[in-house]
Image (cartoon, rainbow, N blue to C red):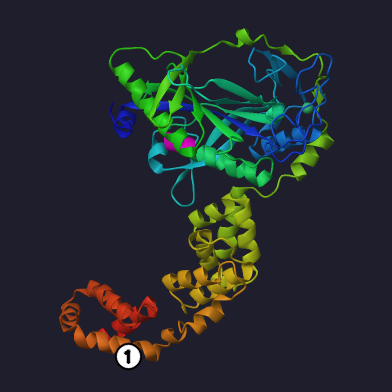
Amino acid sequence: MRKLSEVLHDWEAVIGLEVHTELTTLETKMFCGCRLSHDDPPNTNVCPICLGMPGALPVPNRKAIEYIVMAGIATNCEVMRRSMFYRKHYFYPDMAKNFQTTQGPVAFVMHGHLDLEIAGDGAKERPDGTIEKAIDGSYVAPIRILRIHMEEDAAKMVHVGGAEGRIGGASESLIDYNRCGTPLIELVTEPDLRTPEEARRFMEKLRQTFLTLGISDCSLEKGSMRCDGNVSLRRRGESGLGTKTELKNLNSFKSLHDALAYEICRQAEVLEAGGTVLQETRHWEPSRKRTVVMRVKETNDDYRFFPDPDLAPFDLSDEFIERCRARVPELPDTKRDRYVATWGLKRSDAAKLAGDPAVARRFEDASHGVKPQAVPMLANVMLNLVPAYKALTLLQITSITELLAADALSFSQARKVLEAVDGTGKMPLAVARDWGMLQSNDTEALAAVVDEVLGRCEAQVQQYRDGNKKVVGFLVGQCMKASKGAGNPKVFNQLLVQKLEG
Ligand SMILES: [Zn+2]
């Protein structure tokens, strides 16, 4: 198969995503009062409603509806005042009722968009002219969202055992109904994504948004956020749509990217050989890096959709919608722009901090403990140092930030200090002083090291005077060695240049 970049030169990929998110931060299930927890022993959080016993009547979880409306508002969707639950019938052991309660043609929220920053290359190729240029030269593409609807999750099946030679590998299937009835929101995008990388970034942005809303733990690892991808190809310059395939089992950002990349190349190969792409559902096999056919696509009619007679239609009041709107916190893009405006952070750093609500909160708390001009250094510390340690306190973070901002320590010295204070109550300033690190930034002590190095590196000194300014890097290295790594490379650099130019 050809490489993705070559394929995308001739073909345009048209990608849409369906993202399922479990509302894991709720206390109870969607239609009953069972505890919502996947960590309890199997089949302990069950009742006649979620087990689908005859005569059991569902009662919708009001909080779950608040959450889906918040998700809609955060993704610029229209809140539909009237919608209904439908039944989607199929037989499968993980759904005791033999139907899934989901929504019909009208979902709770519809017709929104989530803005995605894309690289210049991707923007030029977009014919629809809907792209705006962003401040830093990248482009902003609104990825349209068709709908977000509410449904319930099925039970969890675990396939175990497995005698040798047995087809499929497992000898028994176990079932845990704890997950059955977990409220699940399904977001469906329009096919506005054009590359696997854009799809991955959209998913990341959606995850950041839902994490910020606090409606789910959004764990791809645990399966509380899952993604299917639809992809078709068309020749560059064409506007019709090709036949799409649906990809399942994209349970990590890497799988999402790699499966789409593989599928784009596979479809191109089929089309270039004069074949036709079949509309089918395919399964991604990460270990073999390929997609395989799961089933030929069913049509909706097979599911016998009809409104659920046990659940009355919903009429959402203005008051309810406004209450949901008021509960939407500051979203990642707004937060990013505020960080840039308030502290002059680099836009990319600001976006990384703002994307994770826990990191953003910690960063803002720590910002009160440093001088305003040291906040960009704090951002650097939060992104590049803090993640490597287990239990740094806010005071330790602000102390190391001030030392770095004042140029009293180098980054490698800061790492050593943080290693020593992590999980203890010790302060970086005290440790750095005890270890003599702060003295070693004292210019006089370092000047002696510089003189010694310049004295024995005559060849390099000559090279510098002959115009090879880069050789100063070598000399800084010699000074670091001579000071046993205790000196500050920035100070060494300044002193060396002073002496060499003088
Ligand atoms: Zn229940």
Q: Quadrant of the C terminus?
A: bottom left
The vertical placement of 496 against 84, above or below, is below
Which residue position holds label 1? 448
Percent x, y of residue 48: 81, 22
Percent x, y of residue 134: 49, 47
The yes-or-no answer for disc 1 within 8 Å of ligand 1 is: no
Residue at the image position 34 percent from the left and 89 percent from the top: 447
Report whether residue 149 is seen.
yes
Find the residue positioned furthest to the front.
163
Q: Quadrant of the N terminus?
A: top left
Residue at the image position 66 percent from the left and 30 percent from the top: 185
Ligand 1 visible in quadrant: top right
483 falls in the magenta region: no
Say which quarter of the image contains residue 53.
top right
Q: Is residue 416 left or right of residue 458?
A: right
498 or 47: which is nearer to us? 47
Q: Amino acid at mark 1?
A: Ala
Q: In the rendered structure, which segment of residues is drawn in magenta?
A: 196-200
Percent x, y of residue 465: 18, 81
The vertical placement of 171 against 493, above or below, is above
Percent x, y of residue 343: 57, 64
The vertical placement of 443 against 80, above or below, is below
Report whether residue 31 is seen.
no
Q: Main secondary structure of the magenta part?
A: helix
502 or 206: which is nearer to us? 206
